[in-house]
Amino acid sequence: MDRAVTLQQMLDTREKRSFLRRRYFNSDREGLFLQFTLNIPGERKNSDLIRRVFREGLKELESRFPTIRFLKESDEDKNTGPEGFAILRGRPLEIKKILCESEENHPLGRLWDFDLFVSPDRSVSREETGFEGRLCLICDHPAHQCSRSRSHSVEDIHRKIQEMCRKHFAQTSSHTV
């Protein structure tokens, strides 16, 4: 599971997600389509720690949206990274705002990527709800700029992710004792 993935594998996975969205929106749809993945840079997209971060995101979704319905295509064990798919009911902008609040305010939220689709090819953007674009984990500049210019090494970003996880899971495990 903790194997390096190729660019082709990532492209194939994205194509499968697109196919799943199209299939959903072409059927008798009953709500909005949520796609949940993680922001993990580099060639290794799955591990015990990554699955733990993913499960925290699932718990967050269930606490924020008690009527959420996860699809059977959800899979935390994919080599290309965990993927969750769900159906939500409600107003798209209100739901996206709640999703952005979780991404911004939960200690692991910056690792989560909640995409809310209103059609197969259109998701509700953060900006539509008044949120700014995602920020870099290391320097708080716009993430897309740092990613494009490769301002930080994958190793530095992974260290930051591990630090975030250590801190969060140490706090949560002390509360459950």
Image (cartoon, rainbow, N blue to C red):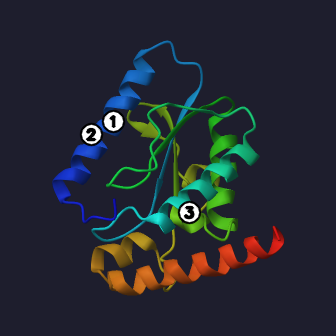
Q: Please tell me which residue lies in front, 153 or 94.
A: 153
Relative to 18, say whether 59 is above or below. Answer: below
Q: Is residue 45 left or right of residue 160?
A: left
Q: Is residue 23 above or below residue 83?
A: above
**Which quarter of the figure has residue 95?**
top right
Image spot of residue 104 (x, y percent): 64, 65
**Residue ID for mark 1:** 18
Q: CA distance from mark 2 to mark 3?
A: 24 Å
Instruction: Mark 2: give few (<14), some (14-19) or many (20+) Cα within 10 Å.
Output: few
Q: Earlier in the sequence, mark 2 or mark 3?
A: 2
Q: Which mark is residue 15?
A: 2
Q: Amino acid at mark 3?
A: Val
Q: Secondary structure at mark 3?
A: helix
Cβ–Cβ under 8 Å for marks 1 and 2 = yes
Residue appearing at x 57%, y 64% in the figure: 132
At a point 33% along the width and 36% down the height, the residue shown is 18
Answer yes or no: do the residues labelled 3 and 1 have beta carbons within 8 Å? no
Quarter holding the C terminus is bottom right
Q: Three-letter amino acid code at disc 1?
A: Ser
Q: Nearer the viewer, residue 156 or 142?
A: 156
**Mark 3 lies on residue:** 53
Please, is residue 151 above or below residue 176 in the view? below
